[in-house]
Image: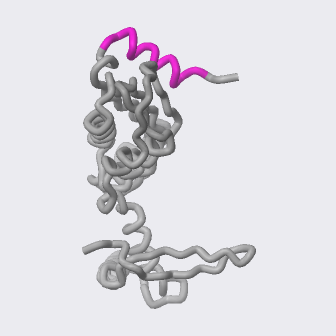
Amino acid sequence: MNKTDAYPDRDEGIDGYKKIDRYNTGLIDNLSGLYHNVLEQIGEDPNREGLLKTPERMAKAMLFLTQGYDLNAEEILKSAMFKEEYSQMVVVKDIEVYSMCEHHMLPFFGKAHIAYIPNGHVVGLSKIPRVVDVFARRLQVQERLTNEIRDCIQETLNPLGVGVVIECRHLCMSMRGVQKQNSVTTTSAFTGEFLKEKTRTEFLNLITAKLG
């Protein structure tokens, strides 16, 4: 069932701007009922004023946070592939990442740094962050997220190599469990030329460099 079948929810904003979110009404109703029950089970009163619309808001939030299941990262890249005889490293760094840990359903967030070396084709730069979002907007573990981004770029663009580094903070570590507030998890994945120490070192130097 498509989560984004037309269901306009209009929220009047500043200057008359209307935000329109579209959701499948059946899914919203089903999820809202489940969240209503969750509120009861934890000892809350879902019928009190402050919580009356919370189940519906939670349902819409969950569908937004998992919208990656309905998106195709390969098609996104293919929509903006261009022939270009450029064979030096292309780096897009500091891409914001927001995802949900599949173990505790709590957020993890941080930055992704991605590079590839073209092999006859380049891709529109905005498509790289979109690929990150496709895989991040699913229930994830950071290790798999890193590999999925790498594999999608490698298999779609067929570059000479791909490098991916992701740095994230996990609320399942800071809010519960070991409750370590400042820990950061770093994962990396490489193909092709990035398996060579010289290329990998250049990439790592570029993503840590401060311009200006």
Is residue 60 part of the magenta span, yes or no? no
Query: Going by the image, does 59 lie left or right of 104?
Result: right
Q: Position of residue 67 (x, y in %)?
A: 36, 62
Query: Going by the image, does 200 lie left or right of 102?
Result: right
Which residue appears at 31% of the width and 54% of the height? 72
Q: Position of residue 3 (x, y in %)?
A: 33, 72
Is 112 placed above or below 23 here? Answer: above
Number of on-image labels: 0
Residue furthest to the right:
15
Give the quarter of the image for residue 43. Answer: bottom left
Task: Please report the bounds of the magenta region as a residue range.
Answer: 196-209
Give the camera-side residue of 204 and 191.
191
What is the chief secondary structure element of the magenta stretch? helix
In the picture, the quarter occupied by the C terminus is: top right
Is 134 placed above or below 62 here? Answer: above
Which residue appears at 41% of the width and 33% of the height? 83
Which residue appears at 29% of the width and 33% of the height? 154
Give the quarter of the image for residue 102. Answer: bottom left
Q: Position of residue 21 (x, y in %)?
A: 49, 74
Is residue 103 among the parts visible in the rendering? Answer: yes
In the picture, the quarter occupied by the N terminus is: bottom left
Give the camera-side residue of 43 and 198.
198
